Image (cartoon, rainbow, N blue to C red):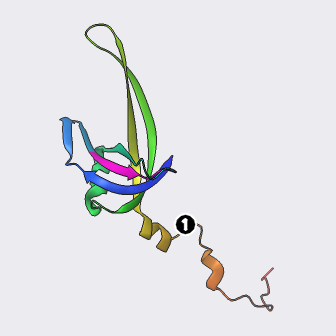
Amino acid sequence: MEITGRIHLIYDTQTIKDTFRKREFILNYISDNPDYPQYLKFEFIQDNCSMLDNFSVGDEVKVSFDLRGRKWINPKQEEVYFNTLQAWRIVKISDAEEHPADKDVDSDIPLTEDDDLPF
């Protein structure tokens, strides 16, 4: 999944266990109704936490993420459900526009009629 928006907050990396780290950020997502902006919390985990080092509050970005959900039984034996937006890539909108992935790489190569194949 992908979403675009503006970075509203970036948190420090948290070490949950010796083997698990996460870093959260808030994305201000402007939907079809700009009167009601949405503030969505995403997280990077493990080595991906450093992906946020080159970003600042206010940057317009495109985030690629997975939607994660899990069930937990609390001490009262009640089922509780959690959702997580787990990011795995983030790019600045201006960078994505400057280097489009679908740009025709061969467009600068001149075509000639005397191209003769060697076989």
Instruction: Depth check: give the residue in front, 59 or 52.
Output: 59
Image quadrant containing the C terminus: bottom right
Q: Answer whether residue 28 is magenta in the image.
A: yes
In this image, 36 relative to 25: left or right?
right
Q: Residue at x 40, y 25 (%)?
A: 70
- In the rendered image, which residue does mark 1 sit on? 101
Where residue 64 sits in the image (x, y, percent)? 45, 50
Q: How many marks?
A: 1
* Secondary structure mainly formed by the magenta segment: strand
Q: Residue at x 22, y 48 (%)?
A: 11
Q: Which residues are magenta?
A: 24-32
Where residue 58 sits in the image (x, y, percent)? 31, 62
Is residue 18 at least partly visible in the picture? no
Residue furthest to the top in view is: 77
Type of amino acid at the residue the image marks with label 1 = Ala
Is residue 49 at least partly visible in the picture? yes
Instruction: Depth check: give the residue in front, 49 or 119.
Output: 49
In this image, 98 relative to 47: left or right?
right
